Amino acid sequence: MTRPAIELRGITKTFGSIVANKNIDLDVRYGEILSILGENGSGKTTLMNMISGIYFPDAGQILINGHEVVIRSPKDAFAHGIGMIHQHFKLVDVFSAAENIVLGHEEKRFNKKAIAAEVREICELYGFDVDPEKKIYEMSVSEKQTVEIIKVLYRGADILILDEPTAVLTPQETEKLFAVLRRMRDAGKAIVIITHKLHEVLSLSDRVSVLRKGEYIGTVKTAETDETALTEMMVGKKVSLNIERNDPKSLEKRLEVKDLTCIDREGTQVLSNISFSANGGEILGIAGIAGSGQRELLEAIAGLQKYQTGEILYFDPATGETESLKDKTPMQIRELGVRLSFVPEDRLGMGLVGNMDIVDNMMLRSYRGGKSAFLDRKKPKDLADEIIEELEVATPGVHTQVRKLSGGNVQKVLVGREIAAAPTVFMAAYPVRGLDINSSYMIYNLLNKQKENGVAVIFVGEDLDVLIELCDRILVIGSGQITGLVDARRVTKEEIGLLMTRSVSSDGAAPEKEGEKE
Amino acid sequence: MPAFFSELIAILSRAIASGMPFLYGSTGETLTEKSGHLNLGIPGIMCVGASSGCVAIAAYAGSVGGLENGNPFLCLLLSVLASVSGGVLMGLIYCFLTVTLRANQNVTGLALTTFGTGVSTYMISKVENADFVPANKFFTYSVRNAVGHNAFTDSWFGELFLSYGFMIYLAIIIAVIAAYVLKKTRIGLNLRAVGENPATADAAGVNVSRYKYVFTCIGSGIAALGGLCYIMDNLNGNWEYSISEIGWLSIALVIFTLWRPNLGILGSVVFGALRILGNSNFIRGVDKSILQMLPYLVTILVLVVVSMRNRRENQPPAHLGQNYFREER
């Protein structure tokens, strides 16, 4: 079963002056699962997009089943039996599962019953569970992903490419997905999964191909490698993968959330009866399926989200007084001396202004401080220089527009600015999303440093392994409710996974918001 | 037949006739919007549709030496074809700017409205009004005219269903076909996907640009007929610049009918009724200008209600107004 399905020869793709892929050779075989491993920005997705017809290579050849082919559009890719499951699901929200599955599939007949029957047949064959008539916007993330997979199977794909398929799944859902993938492999299909999670690579795939900065580094058999060796291939140098976690000392209560209930504009209850406290000198992790209310919770604390009942109390470390944050604007919260720093999930949308340079983005936090009628750019510029220096931001200069920086560097500028405000409570939502391994560990260390300084750190994360290694306590939320508060030193990933889905299974699908954003 | 009843039938019959220009406009705009393009050029397109149709009649009349010597069918066919072509040409300009060059849709649409109004003024100034006014009798030739007045054609049924020219029926037929295509066919599914999420449609192998071009142009062609219908049927061939009002109201009608051409048939009759109210002394003591506002007010009300209920199926296409570029990153 080692017949090659896809052979890539010298594939190169550039976007303007950026080389996304450089002279890449790669083989994918039938009856195996191949992992494409690489950090964010290493060109994994670009490479696969060329096989699935989204991009067209500048140079090089693609061979399918031993014959050279030209793939100009997704249609061509389907004709060669290639199906790709994208990281951002390519589904039409207001369509039903069946409508999404047949979309673009050119056959004369358009019979909803026959389509539904065919979909059920595929479901039975591989053990999926999906209602063909259900609308996408009513589905949970993992259901959406199932629809995506059925979609490519319905088109008769023999070569499946999955782009970061586990990023949004719970550990249990991930296991289910892996079981399906193994069944498909055993049925003789060629499967490619793009990922940067090492443990998944090791548990699932037969071979691993590594990309680094757009270049092909090599391919190894999974059985003959381990985490350290793969990381070295990925990063190009030895990296220590341990997060230094000291026991919290001199804990003092900094923030208390009491019975917080929040109903959003559409009338859905996004947070119900949330109560917890955060202490200075510890990192409190928040785990949960994307869109379970994490964003609303942080925004409620920062004063950006109105809440109906409940109270948020702040214990000022300088004066020892207790302040209530309810019904205060973000500005009032700051004026009261309550310092909250907030890294929104959507870093360019809410954190920074893309068309302004780094200095001006620094001023967004400080421009009210000046006394003169004219702006003083000296201090913000010094701060920008400092952040670029300390966090190793790759930028042509302080006056570069932020939107021109790569995702990781944008994130560093944002985190750097928020930390520079010397907060007493530091909230960070997905601060390492899109960062490479080195930068991620730099951010973890920064959070740890804040903790050492007595700051109450609240960290919303998506990688459970990191949450367990970095945090002191982990608050688990599901569908806007607290489903557990656990000691990060004793808990296992599976336990958190179960807590994440606990309330979800009792009242149907979780309200899911993440997927809608592009 | 009681007098009140016959009066009601007469009003309804007029409402249907004056509603159909809206129906052309809204069916055309709905098809365009389903492909993700907000074409604010509809008023201009309707102007061009009307003037090209009129110019074609005048040209035909000139070539056969007076309409009375010509073939009515050929005259109507040429007029309708010219009107549709005018609309499609305008649609092509819009598509080239917004699909190919990815220009801002709102600005392009508004520019096209101004442009279309100007072009139609120029075209009409080059022909004698007298050349196309007589063609009005071809446009309004109804079943009742064909079989003559009798007990059946003068009954309420005859008044409601047999008293119109062909363009009134054509509007309804087009709307029904459009509704069927959108809801029941693979082409409709693909088109809706293009407007909802072009990246998804693209990845599924749908030719996004082709769908956008084809349906924006078809939509413009249909909308153009609305202008012709307004001038030659409703206004009996008298040229008026109020066509662009019909255009704006048609765009409002799209929202009013929640992007559904079959609802558009009912909606256009409502708009037609509101419009006759605005132009008549039916309700005494109320200022005419207030009555003329009614269609817009109703649309605002519908928007409020729809936004409050917030059902996903009733929302505009998700990518309405946003241009699509595959290799954007």
Image (cartoon, coloured by chain):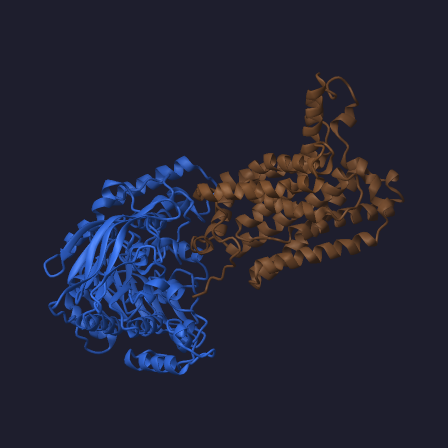
**Image point (68%, 27%), residue name:** B161
The answer to which of A334 and A242 lies nearer the viewer is A334
Quadrant of the rendering where the C terminus of chain A is positioned: bottom left
| Palette colour of chain B | brown
Give the image quarter of residue B181: top right
Quadrant of the rendering where the N terminus of chain A is positioned: bottom left
**Image point (39%, 69%), residue name:** A352
How many callouts does the rendering have? Answer: 0
Looking at the image, residue B90 lies above or below residue B276: below
Looking at the image, residue B202 lies above or below residue A505: below
The answer to which of A20 and A386 lies nearer the viewer is A386
Q: Position of residue B179 (x, y in %)?
A: 55, 39
For the view shown, which residue lies furthest in the right direction? B65
The answer to which of A365 and A314 lies nearer the viewer is A314
From where the camera sits, is residue B195 visible?
A: yes
Q: Position of residue B141 (x, y in %)?
A: 77, 32
From where the camera sits, is residue B27 visible?
A: no
| Palette colour of chain A | blue
Q: Position of residue B148 (x, y in %)?
A: 79, 23
Give the image quarter of residue A17: bottom left
Position of B259 with respect to A337 (left or right) is right
Position of A136 with respect to B135 (left or right) is left
Q: Position of residue A252 (x, y in %)?
A: 15, 64
Position of B329 with respect to B35 (left or right) is left
The answer to which of A433 and B184 lies nearer the viewer is A433
**Image point (18%, 49%), residue name:** A498
